Image: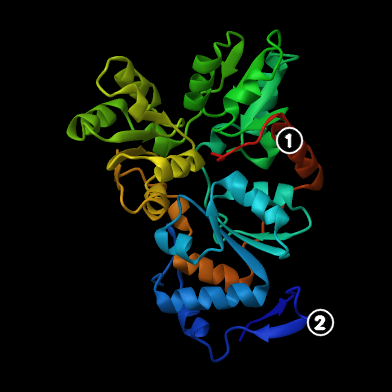
Amino acid sequence: MFSIISRKPELDEEATVTVLNGTPAGALADRIVDGPGGYSGIDGDEQWAAEVRRLVELRGATLLAHNYQLPAIQDVADHVGDSLALSRIAAEAPEDTIVFCGVHFMAETAKILSPDKTVLIPDQRAGCSLADSITAEELQAWKDDHPGAVVVSYVNTTAAVKALTDICCTSSNAVEVVASIPEDREVLFCPDQFLGAHVRRVTGRKNMHVWAGECHVHAGINGDELAAQARSHPDAELFVHPECGCATSALYLAGEGAVPEDRVKILSTGGMLDAARETSARQVLVATEIGMLHQLRRAAPEVDFLAVNDRASCTYMKMITPAALLRCLVEGADEVHVDPETARLGRASVQRMIEIGQPGGGE
């Protein structure tokens, strides 16, 4: 038997709630297996979904899921979106407990913006190759080499990196953030080299240095694949995430006339959803992590959304399995902690971004 404390606002007093004894959750929890690839042993079926919703209610929690999560995780969540939008929802939610189905830096960002709330991630081993591509020590050394430079960090960074950052940005407002910096100030942009190249190309900024980091999933979607898919689907629009290694190739295809320029759209995940609702195209080629297809198809079911690379799946994102989520709700684990001073400094860099311009669709 396992008990939790429910602190839902509508309860008159603190109530102890038994969650396993004599319930389907008990039988399901007994099947959970922990292995090198994460927690397994449970399917995301209707029984599982019902138990997840019951436990979310008992915990008085808000359940958030990133756009790249497994469809079953997205479908059971209270809110689905990009990491920054979800972190802002977490800060505004009346519930004291946030269950964040995403990778670790995303749960950290939620904790930074909601320091007094309990933030849980179903598997704390769910990392991020992009966030890991720069450490706080590496950023400090880079800053020491460029005294007086303004550090602009993508929100896809750790709390420690955000704490050393002057202004955060998203893929929606990175151009606006960099353009807001006086032209005589050097800019250090990290960690994504492809987003940085996109910003430098659009702004024409000469004194902008870009860190050579990348998301291994987006970097793996290459220009040859994009060109081949565009030839096979000549009437399709192209939705390309700026983290992709093929973003420059997409612009080249448009410039060469291989694809009409108005069909090539470099978009954040939130921007993709907005464009999906507005497109008149019958087919759209999508260059981002394949979990995004689930939300796009829900937003515009009449459109045929096709992955440019159907192998573009983030192993870390997919570590948030049905088994991991159930374990999280049963055990109240894994809790995310951020040092208060680190959180204070990181929160300031996010707030400066919001003051410059609305961050839009996040990453």
Q: Residue furthest left?
A: 232
Any mark on residue 47, and which?
Answer: none
Q: Position of residue 34 (x, y in %)?
A: 47, 66
Q: Would residue 228 appear left or right of 94 to someone viewing this image?
A: left
Residue sitting at 69 percent across and 13 percent down?
146
Q: Nearer the viewer, residue 354 or 315?
A: 354
Mark 2 highlights which residue?
A: 13
Residue sitting at 70 percent across and 25 percent down?
140
Label 2's element?
loop
Q: Position of residue 108 (x, y in %)?
A: 66, 48
Residue sitting at 32 percent across and 29 percent down?
222
Q: Nearer the viewer, residue 160 or 23?
A: 23
Q: Is residue 107 visible?
A: no
Quadrant of image for the C terminus: top right
Residue sitting at 38 percent across and 71 percent down?
43
Any mark on residue 163, and which?
Answer: 1
Q: Position of residue 99 (x, y in %)?
A: 61, 62
Q: Nearer the viewer, residue 161 or 301?
A: 301
Above/below status of 163 relative to 212: below
- CA separation, marks 1 and 2? 38 Å
Above/below status of 17 relative to 189: below
Identify the image's colour scheme: rainbow, by chain, secondary structure or one colour. rainbow
Label 1's element?
helix
Q: Would residue 169 appear left or right of 116 to someone viewing this image?
A: left
